[in-house]
Amino acid sequence: MDYALHLADNALILGQRNAEWCGHGPVLEEDLALANHSLDLIGQARLLYQWVAEHRADGSTEDSLAYFRDPHAFLNFTLLELPHTTALAPSARADRDYAVTIARNFLFSSYMVLVWEVLQYHPEPRLAAIAAKSLKEVRYHWQHAADWLIRLGDGTPASHDKAQAAVDFLMPYTQEFWCEWPAAKHALPDTQDMQTAWWTMVNEVLSEACLRLPEAKGHVTQGVHGIHSEHMSYLLAEMQSLARQHPGATW
Amino acid sequence: MSQNEHANEWPLWEVFVRSKQGIEHKHCGSLHAADAQQAIRMARDVYTRRQEGVSIWVIPSASITASDPADKESMFDPAKDKVYRHPTFFVIPDEVGHM
């Protein structure tokens, strides 16, 4: 079940990050698009948390999993908790850069298209059903992100430079997609083909976007083991504070 | 709108959504987008997120030629007293349904 929890945490954390654009989008249409994507992701997270909670049968609920776990208990990729900026700034609010949002959504949705494609045939019917539903959603997220990345990369010199900086900054974090850990190994036994397919997908769009394909190297982050960046606590604090101030509150 | 005035803005598109197969596309609003493909995508996010549609059309707003509101009287008022143009004198069998 750690893998289902990892998938849920991925969806929730990116959903929360992208929701930061709600009311602050560069244009109204993109504001709505990002909020839509966040709702898709949070919907996926809910389905997975409900499943994990039932399986645990220890009184856990989707809410307790989302709001009452601390950073080390979250198994999401580090990539997804980073603020929308290439600067290593302590504040998530400083200098939100849409190129980072788009580049992250592109790198991650490319990966999730491949993951859900495999999981839709998973022997566990509940996971297979969640995968089939999520696949439709993430294919759209991918189209949205790829389309924007091409427009930014092949746009003005300024948009090109920002897009390249975003891709360069985020690429090292994608190494975590392929790190081997027991729960993932069980759910996705063969990531070798997936990795090849991912690089092909990414490379095709980057070259259409006139962007250079950077190497994914350097430190491999450990989000899937609960070891997160300094940004994770701030993100969770914002997301969880209301539920923690008023435990058990309902509408 | 003059081209210069809005030179830095994306062009405006009119959005038509078909709510289900067999029903015509209906105008539901407009939005700004850089090109037609992007306009379709944005229309999906802006106008169909509550399951409103199964198909979307977009056309550049600039392609629409509209009647002049000042001509309203001469354009539309003469039809007012020609009630015989309504096919209300026919009995439509129930089986025909909506016409």
Image (cartoon, coloured by chain):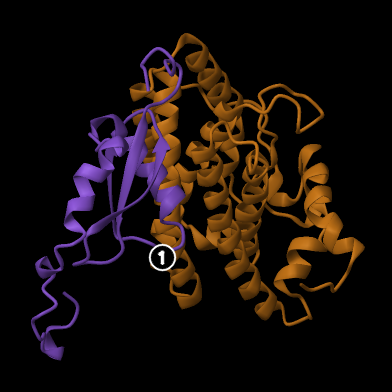
Chain colours: A orange, B purple
Give residue B54's position: percent from left, percent from top. 30, 60
Picture quadrant where residue B84 is located = bottom left
Q: Tell whether B78 sits left or right of A11.
A: left
Q: Is residue A246 above or below residue B40?
A: below
* Extreme-top residue of the structure: A157
Q: Which chain letter goes with mark 1? A: A
Quadrant (top left, top right, bottom left, bottom right) of the C terminus of chain A: bottom right
Q: Which residue is mark 1?
A: A132
Q: Tell whether A132 sits left or right of A162.
A: left
Please say whether residue A191 is visible from this viewpoint.
no
Seen from the viewer's position, the closer of residues A120 and A240 is A240
Q: Is residue A141 above or below residue A24?
A: below
**How dense is the environment of label 1, judged by Cα within 10 Å: few (below 14), some, or many (20 and up)?**
some
Quadrant (top left, top right, bottom left, bottom right) of the N terminus of chain A: bottom right
Q: Residue placed at 79% from the left, 80% from the top?
A: A59
Three-letter residue code for mark 1: Ala
Seen from the viewer's position, the closer of residues B79 and A101 is B79
* Extreme-front residue of the structure: B81
* Extreme-right residue of the structure: A245
